[in-house]
């Protein structure tokens, strides 16, 4: 079976490095020894297992990508970089006709979609790569569509906690806001309680010490007007391994779409993790 060539962008970030390690051990994939990284990174290389990965900063990526494409004619980029880089990176992938999986949250999501649709490559866009959480979101989507205003009159609180280095508010939490709005609870993204203080995470949230630097805890609480009824949904992730399988499935799904495009006029297409789960 022909291996799927993958370029992981965002190394040496923790999430992308964890996923890259899983890709190295998955027989479906071959990890390229190159990675786009941020302008603040001064190291020229990063060692991952027995592989030395050349790090490419924004100021030399145009030259570097030409050399990479000479060596590898077909590959997929997986992006776990920084929210401020989302739109610029997406434009770079589209301009260079590189299919990509965008796992980075933040940025201008409307512009992101417009950029992809203006080009001729497909992309998977997902603020969360954990398949089980994506499935939970699909259940919420079903409820919001089938039972609108089910929780009308209820108050809502949303709390999320991530490692101190996460720069933006959880994309998963923001997506949930939309479902709860349709279920009848007015709420805005600005009302999400975002925790990044390690001491509060240890002492109040009781997050295990070994996962303070890598976790994603979310709690959604609905309370009736008279405070006699309370519904609470939580999903707490410790570590980063859960994101690897979903990301690899997304890359394999995108590769299958490239195969289907061979005899068609190429055009920009956007897929989500729901599409990946359905395999359609």
Image (cartoon, rainbow, N blue to C red):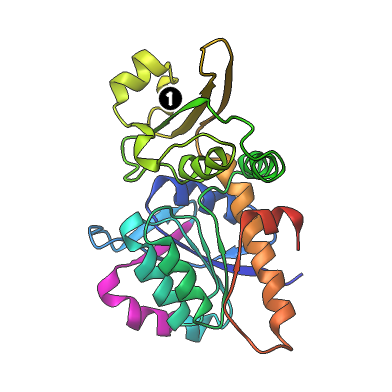
Q: In which image quadrant can residue 198 be found?
A: top left
Q: Residue 263 location in percent, x, y? A: 74, 89
Question: Is residue 144 found left or right of 49 in the rendered image?
Answer: right
| Segment colored magenta | 51-68
Question: Is residue 62 found left or right of 232 in the rendered image?
Answer: left
- Residue sitting nearer the eye, 152 or 140: 152
At 64% from the left and 42% from the top, the residue drawn is 144
Q: Residues within 10 Å of mark 1 (few under 14, many from 20)?
A: few
At 61% from the left and 36% from the top, the residue drawn is 149
* Up-down relation of residue 123 to residue 217 (above or below): below
Q: Which quadrant would the C terminus be assigned to in this image?
A: bottom right
Confirm whether the magenta stretch covers residue 64: yes
Confirm whether the magenta stretch covers residue 108: no
At 66% from the left and 89% from the top, the residue drawn is 265
* Up-down relation of residue 50 to residue 159 (above or below): below
Q: Residue 258 location in percent, x, y? A: 67, 76
How many numbered discs sit on the rendered protein? Answer: 1
Determine the main secondary structure of the stretch shown in magenta. Answer: helix
Q: Residue 261 location in percent, x, y? A: 70, 82
- Residue under circle 1? 210
- Residue sitting nearer the eye, 222 or 266: 222
- Assign a secondary structure to mark 1: helix
Q: Which quadrant would the N terminus be assigned to in this image?
A: bottom right
Q: Residue 10 location in percent, x, y? A: 39, 57
- Residue sitting nearer the eye, 107 or 93: 107
The reply to whether residue 78 is visible in this rendering is yes
């Amino acid at each position: 079976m022909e291996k799927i060539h993958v370029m992981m962008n965002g190394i040496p970030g923790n999430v992308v490095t964890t996923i890259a390690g899983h890709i190295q051990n998955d027989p479906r994939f071959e990890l390229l020894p190159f990675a786009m990284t941020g302008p603040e990174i001064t190291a020229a290389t990063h060692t991952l297992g027995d592989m030395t990965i050349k790090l490419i900063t924004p100021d030399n990526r145009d030259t570097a990508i030409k050399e990479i494409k000479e060596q590898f004619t077909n590959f997929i980029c997986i992006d776990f970089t920084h929210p401020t880089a989302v739109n610029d990176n997406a434009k770079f992938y589209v301009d260079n006709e590189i299919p990509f999986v965008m796992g980075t949250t933040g940025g201008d999501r409307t512009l992101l979609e417009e950029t992809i649709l203006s080009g001729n490559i497909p992309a998977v866009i997902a603020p969360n790569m954990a398949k089980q959480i994506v499935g939970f979101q699909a259940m919420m989507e079903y409820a919001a569509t089938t039972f609108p205003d089910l929780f009308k009159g209820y108050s809502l609180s949303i709390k999320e906690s991530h490692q101190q280095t996460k720069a933006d508010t959880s994309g998963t939490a923001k997506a949930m806001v939309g479902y709860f709005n349709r279920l009848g609870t007015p709420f805005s993204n600005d009302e999400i309680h975002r925790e990044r203080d390690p001491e509060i995470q240890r002492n109040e949230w009781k997050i295990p010490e070994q996962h303070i630097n890598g976790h994603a805890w979310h709690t959604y609480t609905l309370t009736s007007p008279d405070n006699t009824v309370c519904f609470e949904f939580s999903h707490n992730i410790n570590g980063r391994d859960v994101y690897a399988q979903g990301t690899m499935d997304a890359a394999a799904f995108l590769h299958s779409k490239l195969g289907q495009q061979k005899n068609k006029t190429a055009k920009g297409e956007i897929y989500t993790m729901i599409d990946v789960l359905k395999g359609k």
